[in-house]
Image (cartoon, rainbow, N blue to C red):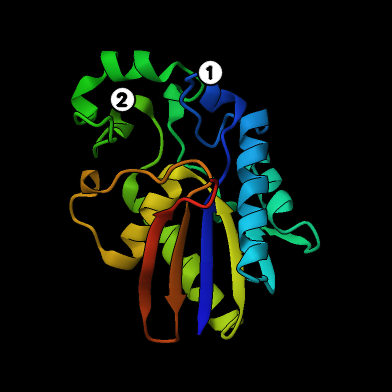
């Protein structure tokens, strides 16, 4: 069985500034984000949980998070783990986007389908497809390993969609910065063990 420990990157500078940050905006971790990742590292050390492989989005905030949590392991970078592309909205203040395009967000600010018609970004379906490809490849290539995955909030949400087939994505909030989700893979099954666990305290 393959055990995936999927962590959202720690707080980035764009997160701290309230900027909508997709795959086109690449800011490093803030001091708080570095501390969040370090706290996760320390917690996992206490649990004696070690990783055979580390795979991360190539975006800086995810790469830094992986390196802080698993400093002795080389990181494999996989572009399929990059954040959802918000298109023209990338880099703008989240509050402005929520107000101007409120029809595409629910009360909890979850992004709803169809925004790509305005933002010229990605579709939920396209990202879910690439993440299905990633999961299938990992299960085949690493059938008995513990793997740390460092990725992004909306991408992790769509990764859960790939596993669970969520028809109403707004029913699931994005994980918090440095929140960990565990998924078990076999050649025939995908199982969510837990979602958005906080190890930063």
Q: Which label number is shown at residue 183?
A: none
Please state if 132 lies on the left or on the right of 41 as rendered: left
Q: Quadrant of residue 191?
A: bottom left
Q: Residue at x 51, y 21 (%)?
A: 91
Q: Residue 73: give x, y in percent of width and height.
A: 77, 64
Category of crowding for the residue at label 1, using alpha-carbon neighbours closer than 10 angstroms: few (below 14), some (14–19), many (at least 20): few
Q: Quadrant of residue 186?
A: bottom left
How many numbered marks are there? 2
Judged from the image, the secondary structure of the residue bearing numbered disc 2 is helix
First-in-chain label (2 vs 1): 1
Q: Is residue 29 visible?
A: yes
Q: Quadrant of residue 41?
A: bottom right
Q: Are marks 2 and 1 in contact (CB under 8 Å)?
A: no
- The residue wearing badge 1 is 17
Q: Is residue 86 above or below residue 169?
A: above
Q: Is residue 115 above or below residue 139?
A: above
Q: Residue 39: give x, y in percent of width and height.
A: 63, 48
Q: Residue 21: give x, y in percent of width and height.
A: 50, 29
Q: Which label number is shown at residue 118?
A: 2
Judged from the image, the secondary structure of the residue bearing numbered disc 1 is loop
Please state if 74 lies on the left or on the right of 142 as rendered: right
Q: Residue at x 61, y 25 (%)?
A: 13
Please state if 111 lies on the left or on the right of 5 as rendered: left
Q: Is residue 56 visible?
A: no
Residue 33 or 183: which is nearer the viewer? Answer: 33
């Amino acid at each position: 069985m393959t055990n995936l420990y999927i962590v959202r990157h720690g707080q980035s500078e764009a997160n701290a500034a309230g900027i909508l940050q997709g795959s086109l905006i690449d800011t490093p971790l803030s001091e708080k984000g570095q501390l969040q990742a370090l706290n996760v590292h320390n917690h996992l050390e206490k649990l004696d949980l070690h990783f055979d492989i580390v795979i991360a989005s190539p975006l800086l905030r995810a790469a830094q998070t992986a390196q802080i949590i698993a400093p002795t392991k080389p990181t494999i970078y996989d572009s399929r783990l990059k954040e959802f592309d918000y298109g023209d909205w990338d880099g703008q203040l989240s509050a402005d986007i929520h107000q101007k395009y409120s029809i595409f967000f629910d009360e909890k600010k979850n992004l709803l389908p169809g925004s790509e018609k305005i933002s010229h970004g990605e579709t939920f379906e396209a990202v879910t497809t690439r993440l299905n490809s990633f999961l299938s490849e990992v299960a085949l290539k690493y059938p008995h390993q513990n793997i740390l995955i460092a990725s992004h909030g909306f991408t992790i949400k769509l990764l859960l969609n790939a596993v669970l087939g969520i028809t109403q994505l707004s029913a699931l909030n994005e994980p918090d910065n440095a929140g960990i989700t565990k998924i078990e893979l076999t050649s025939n099954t995908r199982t969510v063990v837990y979602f958005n666990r906080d190890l930063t305290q």
